[in-house]
Image (spheres, rainbow, N blue to C red):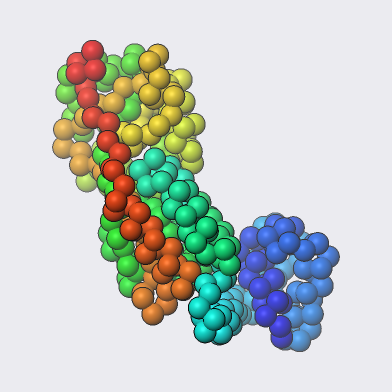
Amino acid sequence: MELRQLRHFIALAEERSVTAAARRELIVQSGLSNSLQALERELGTELYLRGTRPVRLTATGEALLAPAREALRAAETARRAVHETRDVLVGRLRLGIALSAQYLVPFAGYLGAFLRDHPGVDVRMRPAAALAMLDMVETGELDCAIGPALEQRGRLRLTSLAREPLALTCHSDHPLARRGRVKVADLDGERFVDVPPGWTARLLSDALFAGAGLTRRIVAEVGDWEILLEMIAAGAGIGFTPVGLPYGVLTGPDSLLRHLRVDGAQMERHLYLILPPRAETSPAAAAFAAGMLALHSSAPSPAAAPVASERDAG
């Protein structure tokens, strides 16, 4: 079997669509299908179920997935070893990103500097939820990530980059916005606009309500902070959001949103550079991490917006 065939199979397993896998591999759909059929003929078994949406692997396909990934990692290690003898960094950096962290950790600038210094490296950025990024770095699907985490995970290496409080955000007409102080118990039964499961803010909110023995109705799950703020501004509900989000709906002079401090709620997201164990870190990831940390340590920290009550905000 060929490495190309294994790469096409992994793309299908991760994208769960022949069309999406072909687009990812930059080949026509028929070319990817032919490659997969050739692999199946060589192995003497079907690897995925035809006609299912999304695509589902067979039992033999599931069994092949981990060894296929390991084979590609071994091939990439061998290729890097050859290129490193030439003292040139080449290859691909697969970087997980929490896009909303750009204002706290300006990764676009760090990536730009990295690509200028290492023209032989291509970067593939993948936005993902916090838990998903940790899983992908742990399994080798990502080389490193910049994003939030709540605690140490296995053998991963986490370097703190920034921290930011989350505040209860509501429309200025909401009854809670007119109070001087808000307690956790005041949130019982409220309508919430929240981020999807797996996001740090959702994990913190779920833990807060479970610990207090309270309930809330999640009327909408939104995987984009700006849209979430727009929905709160429209009166759909309230929600916990990072205080420094740089969106006009929150920062504009005519904003209808208010940040409130909730007594007894310790809500804070921490952003990290996430790397696998040192022995499993690719040269590209190691070089990017070193350069990014050097630039980040010398950059001024962005000021976090204060968490104010309606009384403080005037």
Q: Is residue 66 visible?
A: no
Q: Nearer the viewer, residue 2 or 279?
A: 279
Is the residue 26 above or below the residue 175 in the image? below
In percent of width and height, residue 113 lies at: 47, 55
Q: Residue at x 32, y 70 (%)?
A: 154
Q: Residue at x 20, y 42 (%)?
A: 266
In percent of width and height, residue 34 lies at: 82, 72
Looking at the rendering, which quadrant does residue 133 occupy?
Answer: bottom left
Is the residue 151 above or below the residue 283 in the image? above
- How many marks on residues? 0
Q: Nearer the viewer, residue 208 or 147?
A: 147
Q: Residue at x 67, y 66 (%)?
A: 12
Q: Along the horizontal axis of the image, is 28 left or right of 89?
A: right
In percent of width and height, residue 308 lies at: 22, 25
Q: Is residue 124 visible?
A: yes
Q: Residue at x 43, y 63 (%)?
A: 288
In percent of width and height, residue 63 lies at: 58, 80
Q: For the C terminus, give its image quadrant.
A: top left
Q: For the N terminus, give its image quadrant.
A: bottom right
Q: Nearer the viewer, residue 104 or 314?
A: 104
Is the residue 37 above or below the residue 147 in the image? below
Q: Along the horizontal axis of the image, is 15 left or right of 275?
A: right
